[in-house]
Image (cartoon, rainbow, N blue to C red):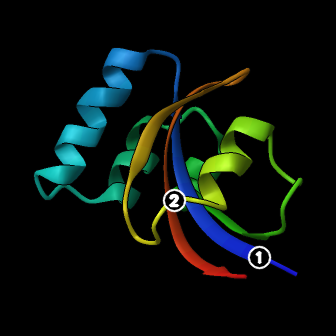
Amino acid sequence: MAEASARHILVDDEAFCEDLKTKIAGGEDFAELAKAHSSCPSGKSGGDLGTFGPGQMVKEFDTVVFSAPVNEVQGPVKTQFGYHLLEVTNRTD
């Protein structure tokens, strides 16, 4: 069964989400930005969501996690919770 490990940053505003993505692309640390800005409790641990299987996250999130390249920041991904930047850190098919 497929499994993935991922981390994310959750914010309320799409433009701010884009700004954070630009900062990461410019070399800023994903985990530090998650700690500073993510509204998800996982932000305290750098946005780390651990390992999970298909169907354990909301659909929009799940779709990206199980299709996007590993170690490449994706987003903004809009869900009912807000806007996410997410990075798949590991995946097995």
Q: Residue furthest left?
A: 26
Left or right, 62 with reference to 87: right
Tell me the quarter of the picture where residue 50 sits: bottom right
Q: Is residue 11 above or below residue 53?
A: above
Q: Which mark is residue 16?
A: none
Q: How many marks?
A: 2
Question: Which residue is rendered at x = 45% and y = 49% of the image?
Answer: 35
Q: Residue at x 18, y 52 (%)?
A: 25
Residue position marked by numbered label 1 in the rendering: 3
* Residue type for callout 2: Ala
How crowded is the residue under tag 2: few (<14 C-alpha within 10 Å), some, or many (20+)?
some
Q: Is residue 54 left or right of residue 31?
A: right
Instruction: Give the quarter of the image for residue 21.
Output: top left
Could you say where residue 29 lies in the image, as x and y percent from the top left?
26, 60
Q: Secondary structure at mark 1?
A: strand
Please give the name of the residue rendered at 60% of the width and 60% of the height, measured from the top-left corner. Answer: 67
Q: Quadrant of residue 14?
A: top left
Pick the quarter of the image with the N terminus: bottom right
| Residue 71 in picture, x, y percent from top left | 40, 70
> Residue 63: percent from the left, percent from the top?
69, 48
Q: Which residue occupies 32% across, 16% down? A: 15
Amino acid identity at mark 1: Glu
Q: Position of residue 16 (x, y in %)?
A: 33, 21
Q: Quadrant of the C terminus?
A: bottom right
| Residue 68 circle label | 2
Near mark 1 (Cα within 10 A), the count class, few <14, some 14-19 or many ≥20, is: some
Name above or below for residue 63 compared with residue 58.
below
